[in-house]
């Protein structure tokens, strides 16, 4: 059941995420595709062959949200491994490189594979059903940027 695609892959996929802040609010997308379709998440996506990690971060953020950010700061590397059926390898395996940055321009709007976008206030985060790793890197990003 393994192959070169994203589902039941033969290697991990590199994903690039961006924790973008506008004041104390963090930019989130509602995912339009698996894995985690319909869930709130950080913007990001798969790195293309020949594309630098920073170029991917900016492209994915722009495509999914229409937002531009200032300088990117490497924040964390997260592994997302979803088990597969019995006797198979992982159904999904992503190594996610997360950057943190502050909003520079653009009004957030859903695009590409994002079904919706929002600038979430800190008190809203617990009720959004975010993946625990997303909550962890948001907290790390907030601390890195000084609140």
Image (spheres, grey):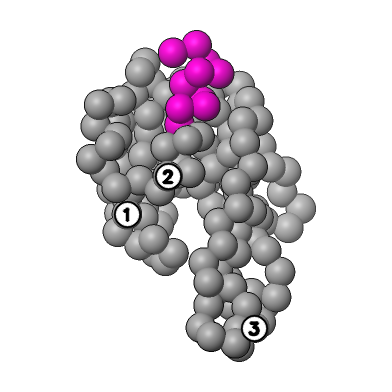
Counting other residues with Cα less than 10 Å from the Cα at mark 1, is it few (<14), some (14-19), or many (20 or more)?
some
Q: Pick whichever of labels 1 and 2 is earlier in the sequence.
A: 1
Image coords of residue 43 (percent x, y):
45, 44
Q: Pick whichever of labels 2 and 3 is earlier in the sequence.
A: 3
Which element type, helix, strand or loop, lies under badge 2? helix
Image coords of residue 77 (percent x, y):
64, 42
Image coords of residue 68 (percent x, y):
48, 29
Q: Are marks 1 and 3 in contact (CB under 8 Å)?
A: no
Q: CA distance from mark 1 to mark 2?
A: 12 Å
Residue under label 1, please give it. Answer: 39
Apparent side of residue 2 relative to residue 129 in the rendered image (left or right)? right
Check residue 89 in the rendering and tell me which mark sits there, or answer none: none
Check residue 2 in the rendering and tell me which mark sits there, or answer none: 3
Q: CA distance from mark 1 to mark 3?
A: 26 Å
Which element type, helix, strand or loop, lies under badge 1? loop
Image coords of residue 49 (percent x, y):
73, 58
Apparent side of residue 107 relative to residue 87 in the rendered image (left or right)? left
Residue under label 2, please give it. Answer: 132
Q: Residue furthest top?
A: 146
In the rendered view, would you say 138 is above or below 12? above
Which quadrant is the N terminus positioned in? Answer: bottom right
């Amino acid at each position: 059941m393994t192959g070169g695609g994203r589902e039941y892959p033969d290697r991990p996929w590199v994903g690039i995420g961006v924790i973008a802040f506008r004041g104390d609010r963090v930019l989130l997308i509602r995912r339009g595709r698996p894995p985690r379709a319909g869930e709130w998440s950080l913007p990001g996506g798969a790195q293309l062959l020949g594309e630098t990690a920073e170029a991917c971060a900016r492209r994915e953020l722009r495509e999914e949200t229409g937002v531009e950010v200032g300088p990117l700061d490497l924040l964390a590397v997260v592994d997302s491994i979803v088990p597969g059926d019995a006797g198979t390898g992982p159904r999904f395996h992503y190594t996610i490189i997360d950057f943190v940055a502050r909003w520079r321009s653009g009004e957030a709007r859903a695009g590409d594979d994002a079904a919706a976008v929002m600038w979430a206030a800190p008190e809203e985060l617990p009720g959004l059903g975010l993946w625990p790793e997303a909550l962890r890197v948001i907290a790390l990003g907030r601390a890195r940027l000084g609140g």
